[in-house]
Amino acid sequence: MRHILLSTLLFISLLLTAGCDDSSTKGHQIADIQARGQLRVGTLYHPLYYFLRDGQQEGLDYELASQFAASLGVELSMVPAYNLGELFALLDSNQVDMLAAGLTNTPQRREHYRFSPSYYHISHTLVYRKGERKPRNMSQVEGTISVLAGSSQADLLFQLHNSQLHNSQLHQSQLKQQPLPKLRWETQFDTDEADLLRQVAEDKADYTLVSDILLARTQRYYPNIEAAFTLGERQPVAWVWGKREDDSAQAAMLDFFAEQAQSGTLARLHEKYFGHIQQFNYVDTRTFLSRIETLLPRYQPLFERHAGKLDWRLLAAMSYQESHWDPNAESYTGVRGMMMLTKDTAKLTGVTNRLNAEQSIRGGAQYLSSLMSRLPDSIPDAERIWFALAAYNIGLGHVLDVRRLTQQLGQDPDAWAQVKANLPLLHQPKWYNQTRYGYARGRETKQFVNNIRQYYQSLLWQDNARTDLGQKAQTEPASHPSLPRS
């Protein structure tokens, strides 16, 4: 995500130099918000933008909006809508001050709205079902593309349709050839992008067009969907404001995003929400989803019993990475059991039989908790677990070595994204010769933590999907749930 932060800073600097002088920022929009004491933000329920987990509000847009409200000295009120039409209607009717829901800054929308600086970019990706013929370009698309009504994807397809119509007429009038295949798409209103992906996965839609980031996250739940190709240029994602005569909101956003980029907050949020996304492994994902159904129910009570202050699903994800939930697992280095404990760790945590599933889970949870408590207090609470997981795999001493190398490189040793990027330095003599504990397999540790984060997200989704399905069953016939609001 480093290139995203650089482009964000460049965009901010260009806007600042273009000029928001004292006279242009004398407006009323921010003053009205501060007089009200509340920033009203329209959003969509979405596992990336805004969701509720155990009664707590979470999501990338929620966290950023919370920071922005705090910078204005006001309270934050999130106002969820259920589709894009409702969302923009909230802004048009002045029921909210701005929209924060992963919305792209497009020429069509700029005709009616203002945008904040971009805080990440997406690519529109055509998605098809694994096993079907993979189209290489739009001329090979044989079916209907389902998109959200009012979305930037719908705008893009409309532009392509007009362009294709013109080219087809050109072919027939000048080249006397057959016209290009007709582009077919449908717009859906009362749904979301995650549900469109579900429809493709379940053979209820031929194709959909969604962001590459959402696809990468969702493949962990529906492994039989794949990217065919990307369409158009990368799009900036930004907050949306109504057009007003004053520039106070624009000036406040410029100051805010500049501060968030310079303080490292944007980098931390990118790491939290995007840092675990990696190359998709179909076989591994199918195996994991299968074992959730066949093996996890046997051990879930043990994870819940011994998790303590940890999330039991995180503990289960860690155990799967270590042993694939096999209590008799053993590695070539001699670590054994569900949590792959060394003899020393087993002795430290009072485990007398490493092949006993409950003893192993209890010992692993106890050891992970102790690592979290031994980390420097300067590490943010939200990122301590990733440092602790790395220490579980590679040893606390090596993690502290990488933190020192990170600081030596002029980077932030408390930022997991930067420490993670430097873990492979422990493979290189130039760097590990400078450390206290020497060589270590840092690349494997980097992958270890990323894998656990992927498994953890899948378990969160599965757990919430079952909850949603149970609630639905009380009021209507059971149907397959879309992505949960968590």
Image: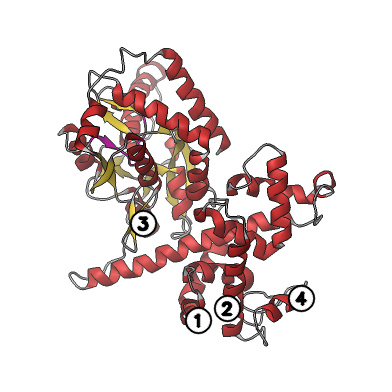
* Magenta residues (range): 97-108
Residue 103, quarter of the rendered image: top left
- Distance, label 2 to label 4, CA atoms, is 17 Å
Instruction: Calculate the distance from the C-alpha at mark 2 to the C-alpha at mark 3.
Output: 34 Å
Instruction: Determine which residue is flagged by label 1.
Output: 302
**Residue 462: image location, x then y, percent:** 41, 66
Of mark 2 and mark 3, the one earlier in the sequence is 3
Q: Give the amino acid type for the residue marked by disc 1 in the picture.
A: Leu
Disc number placed over residue 477 in the picture, else none: none
Q: Please determine whether, in this image, residue 335 is positioned above or below residue 402.
A: below
3D distance between C-alphas at marks 4 and 1? 24 Å
Q: Are marks 3 and 1 in contact (CB under 8 Å)?
A: no
Name which residue type carries label 2. Ile
Q: CA distance from mark 4 to mark 3?
A: 42 Å
Q: Quadrant of residue 164?
A: top left
Mark 1 crowd level (few <14, some 14–19, many ≥20, 10 Å Cα): some
Q: Give the residue at mark 2.
A: 361
Give the label, 2 or 4, closer to the camera: 2
Tell me the residue that label 4 is attached to: 334
